[in-house]
Image (tube, rainbow, N blue to C red):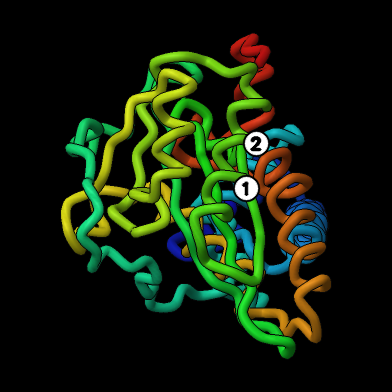
Amino acid sequence: MKEHELVFCIVRMAKLMKVSRSGYYDWRSKKTSRRKVETDNLDKQIRELFALHKKRYGAPRITDELRAQGYQVSRQRIARRMREMGLRAQGKRKFRVTTDSAHKLPVAANVLQRDFTSTQANQKWVGDITYIQTDEGWLYLAVVIDLYSRKVIGWSMSTRINAQLVCDALMMALKARNFPKGVIVHTDRGIQYCAAAYQSIIRWYGLVCSMSRVRDCWDNAVAESFFHTLKTELIYVNRYASRDEARQSIFHYIEMYYNRVRRHSTIGSLAPVVFEEQYKFVA
């Protein structure tokens, strides 16, 4: 009756179906109420997840979280509910290149060739450097990411953007992964990555050095994407009074949130640590 009430008379349909009009109206009001209760509950869950992830999640990841909790929902419905509630994930800003490739040190060939796929851990790593503004001055961050799980396996922060910064990040990655051999380690051509100290680590531990072409950010897109996400979700929405405050914030984001909680579309909408555990990888 509900499907045809705009076409046929309710009185005639009620008589044909041998039901009372009052009974039909009562049923329809209860159904509407149940739908409203379901929608209100869904909205509550969406708001809680949005707040839990500090406005970082849009409709796709909110949908994945709800499905993981057993909700049968579509991405379109979640997007619609978020629009109606005025919930929008933090927008992205233009990314700026920070490394200096204008030097005369030897550079490595581009072994990676933009092939960011990996069938197992410790086949391919990528690294990069970015900067964070604080009221005390700049803080520089170097990271190493395993392309298999997109996990940040090495990182280092310093007030100086030098070879020691990238060496510390690479050594952390090596220790975390029990010093694997033959890993392709891809970076840009920054002077820090061409420095003797960094290249010594590459040779000593049997790694394969790979470097992007000049001023081609797409050659190191995964590392660039991580920094874009970091800045959008963390750096641009906080003002750091000190470098120590920034260090603590970035540490928590990488180790407690990005690696362990944040869903990544490239690895089946799982967090990197969850992905590695699911596929039984042990460093």
Vertical placement of 268 versus 217: above or below?
above
Residue 32 rendering spot, x and y as whole percentages: 74, 59
Residue 28 shows in the view: no
Residue 102 rendering spot, x and y as whole percentages: 23, 68
Residue 61 rendering spot, x and y as whole percentages: 58, 49
SS assignment at label 1? strand
Q: Are marks 2 and 1 in contact (CB under 8 Å)?
A: yes
Residue visible at 52% across and 29% down in the picture: 149
* Residue 231 appears left or right of 8: right
Q: Amino acid at mark 1?
A: Trp
Q: Marks 2 and 1, Cα distance to the nearest angstrom?
A: 7 Å
Vertical placement of 140 versus 240: above or below?
above
- Look at the image and tell me in which quarter the C terminus lies: top right
Residue 130 shows in the view: yes
Mark 2 / mark 1, whichever is N-terminal: 1
Depth order, front residue of 153/107: 107
Label at residue 155: 1
SS assignment at label 2? helix
Vertical placement of 172 versus 119: above or below?
below
Label at residue 81: none
Mark 2 Cα shell of 10 Å, populated few (<14), some (14-19), many (≥20): some
Depth order, front residue of 109/59: 109
Residue visible at 74% across and 45% down in the picture: 255
The residue wearing badge 2 is: 172
Q: Amino acid at mark 2?
A: Met
Q: Residue furthest front?
A: 196
Residue 151 rendering spot, x and y as whole percentages: 58, 36
The part of the image, by quadrant, that contains residue 104 is: bottom left
Residue visible at 59% across and 69% down in the picture: 160
Mark 1 Cα shell of 10 Å, populated few (<14), some (14-19), many (≥20): many
